[in-house]
Amino acid sequence: LLNTVLTIALLQAEFAMLSFAAFILASALVFLAWSARPCPHEPATDSGSLTAIIPVYRDANVLHRSVQSLRDSEYENLDICIVCEPHDSATRRRAEELSELNGVDCLINTKRPGSKAGAINYAVAETDSDFISVHDADELIDAWFLPKAVAKLRTNAVVQGRTIPEPSGFIESLAYSESVLLSYFHRRAR
């Protein structure tokens, strides 16, 4: 009896592992085929003014990442607006240091403090740019992302981009890739 139970359990485990491996392989093939498609929009390096908004709260130690990667962007007419909360002195000091760089401004969220959405809305109300992008403080934005996003904005009102975090291991990388893939197919299947 024990031998039969172990045999059944091992068969179920093998089936589960093979099913999972097949799903991962099929997902990877679909993702690679999708990502190999040419971009239908020619990147736009200057199609009007663009403000990149970075709402921050307790982000002093990572804020430099998004600011530097945005400054390295291939988009030419770009302003960076860091929106700080009034009582977050460490992040505010760091944002003020970074605002000494060309094209970087620091805005204190005095109108709608306490929420990320409030900070974004406040910054949008304060700018007269043709385009707006919003980024997290710890993001690394590829140099080509903004030119491609602005090119898509010529025909769409909103463009959503995804950032890839820096996972700490293989399983985390795999889980993130699967969530992106499943999210993409869910939206496309409608």
Image: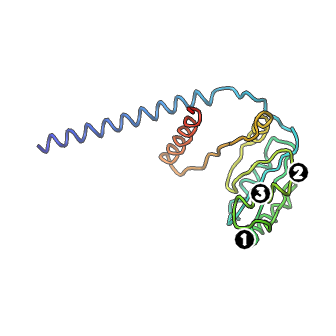
Whole-percent x, y for residue 133 in the image: 76, 48
Decide which of tag 2 and tag 1 comes sooner along the chain: 1
Q: Secondary structure at mark 1?
A: loop
Q: Secondary structure at mark 3?
A: helix
Q: Where the N terminus falls, by quadrant?
A: top left
Q: Looking at numbered disc 1 in the image, what kind of residue is underneath it?
A: Asp
Pointers 3 and 1 in contact (CB under 8 A)?
A: no
Whole-percent x, y for residue 173 in the image: 53, 45
Relative to the observer, which residue lies in front, 47 or 17?
47
Q: Residue at x 69, y 26 (%)?
A: 38
User: In the displayed structure, would residue 72 be above or below residue 30?
Assistant: below
Q: Secondary structure at mark 2?
A: loop
Mark 3, mark 1: which one is toward the viewer? 3
Residue marked by disc 2: 128
Q: Looking at numbered disc 3 in the image, what kind of residue is underneath it?
A: Asn
Q: Marks 3 and 1, Cα distance to the nearest angstrom? A: 19 Å
Residue marked by disc 1: 88
Please tell me in which quadrant of the rendered image residue 77 appears. Answer: top right
Residue marked by disc 3: 121
User: In the displayed structure, would residue 40 be above or below residue 107?
Assistant: above
